[in-house]
Image (cartoon, rainbow, N blue to C red):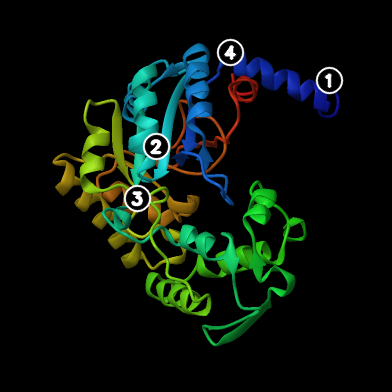
């Protein structure tokens, strides 16, 4: 008889043994395959590193379509060491950089598209904010905004002017780090505004961004490196059958912050739009920001989706909820680092 709880070492050993016997399946979450000079949310994996990741995937597991995985789960079939590649948001670089590499290594993927971005000249709002604040240029010292009856004020002080050298020095900063670790007041401002903007309605957010553009005396031009897919590119992305298109709402909101009616509109309208353009049923969904409620998962099922990916970290098991499938975020690691990271799951 063993008294007390297992030691950390023993728990680790048990976990490793469980992984060997019941490894389950792993859904990988990517966003972009490209190189940028500023990536505050770690959304980008370089084409070189993505190619190395795909080479590793071929060695470690069995790449499947997401719908193949859910079919196997439904049929109680073997899923161990299955690996599913997914992309969120629907950036154009998924077509130009990711697809050719997926084809080269013959690895399927699912791209979850935010339909409100299709064919739009404006970038996603978080990219516009980055272009305004984190690119070289000169900004006014004082920013004062009135948001929902509350007044906010920030001073940029010595960072009103931001040079190309400054950008190169700070380019690896990530917004998920602690505020005190931000390299300059510009990055603190970026993070602060992001946290405010993310919960605003689409109209309120657009109005505030327009105010920021006027304040910055800027003329934002949508960057070709940051744009969303066009209809033609989305059709091209899906052609050949290797890549599946899934829905990711219309405006990329925090669904948990919306009324049930608004959630239904975001979910159903994105599905209807994709089905009209692509000419077939859309069965897969991904929650923007990983945000959902109990009602959200019910809406997903009622809309006719067969599965939904969450941001819950973990592996897919035989008992996993089809509408809260766990995923793991992939960073811009080289192949060796990625292989070491992947070995923890299998």
Q: Callout 3 environment at 10 Å: few (<14), some (14 to 19), or many (20+)?
A: many
Q: Looking at the rendered structure, which numbered label has been put on residue 228?
A: 3
Alpha-carbon span between mark 4 and mark 2: 22 Å
**Which residue matches tag 2?**
322
Q: Secondary structure at mark 2?
A: loop
Image position, residue 12 (x, y; %): 74, 23
Q: Callout 4 environment at 10 Å: few (<14), some (14 to 19), or many (20+)?
A: few
Q: Looking at the rendered structure, which numbered label has been put on residue 245?
A: none
Left or right relative to 1: residue 113: left
Whether residue 304 is visible to the viewer of this picture, yes or no, is yes
> Closer to the N terminus: mark 3 or mark 1?
1
Q: Looking at the rendered structure, which numbered label has been put on residue 2?
A: 1
Image position, residue 119 (x, y; %): 26, 54
What residue do we see at 39% from left, 55% from top?
296
What residue do we see at 46% from left, 33% from top?
320
**Which residue matches tag 4?**
21
Q: Nearer the viewer, mark 3 or mark 1?
A: 3
Q: Secondary structure at mark 3?
A: loop
């Amino acid at each position: 008889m063993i008294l007390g709880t297992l030691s950390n070492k023993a728990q680790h050993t048990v976990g490793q043994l469980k992984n060997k016997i019941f490894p389950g399946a792993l859904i990988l979450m990517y966003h972009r395959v490209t190189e940028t000079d500023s990536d505050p949310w770690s959304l980008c994996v370089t084409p070189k590193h993505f190619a190395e990741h795909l080479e590793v995937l071929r060695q470690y597991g069995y790449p499947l379509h997401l719908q193949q995985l859910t079919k196997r789960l439904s049929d109680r079939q073997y899923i161990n060491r299955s690996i599913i590649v997914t992309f969120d948001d629907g950036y154009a670089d998924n077509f130009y950089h990711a697809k050719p590499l997926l084809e080269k290594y013959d690895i399927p993927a699912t791209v979850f598209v935010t339909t409100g971005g299709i064919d739009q000249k404006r970038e996603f709002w978080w990219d516009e904010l980055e272009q305004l604040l984190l690119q070289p240029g000169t900004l006014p010292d004082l920013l004062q905004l009135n948001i929902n009856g509350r007044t906010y004020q920030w001073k940029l002080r010595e960072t009103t002017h931001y040079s190309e050298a400054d950008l190169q020095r700070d380019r690896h900063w990530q917004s998920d780090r602690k505020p005190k670790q931000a390299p300059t007041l510009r990055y603190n401002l970026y993070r602060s505004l992001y946290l405010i903007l993310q919960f605003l309605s689409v109209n309120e957010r657009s109005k505030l961004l327009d105010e920021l553009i006027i304040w910055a005396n800027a003329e934002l031009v949508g960057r070709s490196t940051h744009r969303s897919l066009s209809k033609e590119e989305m059709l091209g992305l899906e052609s050949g059958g290797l890549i599946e298109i899934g829905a990711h709402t219309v405006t990329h909101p925090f669904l948990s912050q919306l009324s049930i009616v608004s959630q239904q509109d975001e979910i159903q309208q994105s599905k209807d739009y994709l089905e009209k353009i692509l000419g077939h049923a859309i069965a897969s969904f991904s929650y923007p920001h990983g945000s959902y409620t109990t009602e959200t998962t019910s809406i997903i099922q009622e809309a006719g989706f067969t599965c939904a990916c969450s941001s819950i970290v973990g592996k897919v098991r035989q008992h996993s909820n089809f509408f809260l499938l766990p995923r793991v975020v992939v960073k811009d690691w080289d192949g060796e680092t990625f292989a070491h990271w992947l070995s923890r799951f299998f």
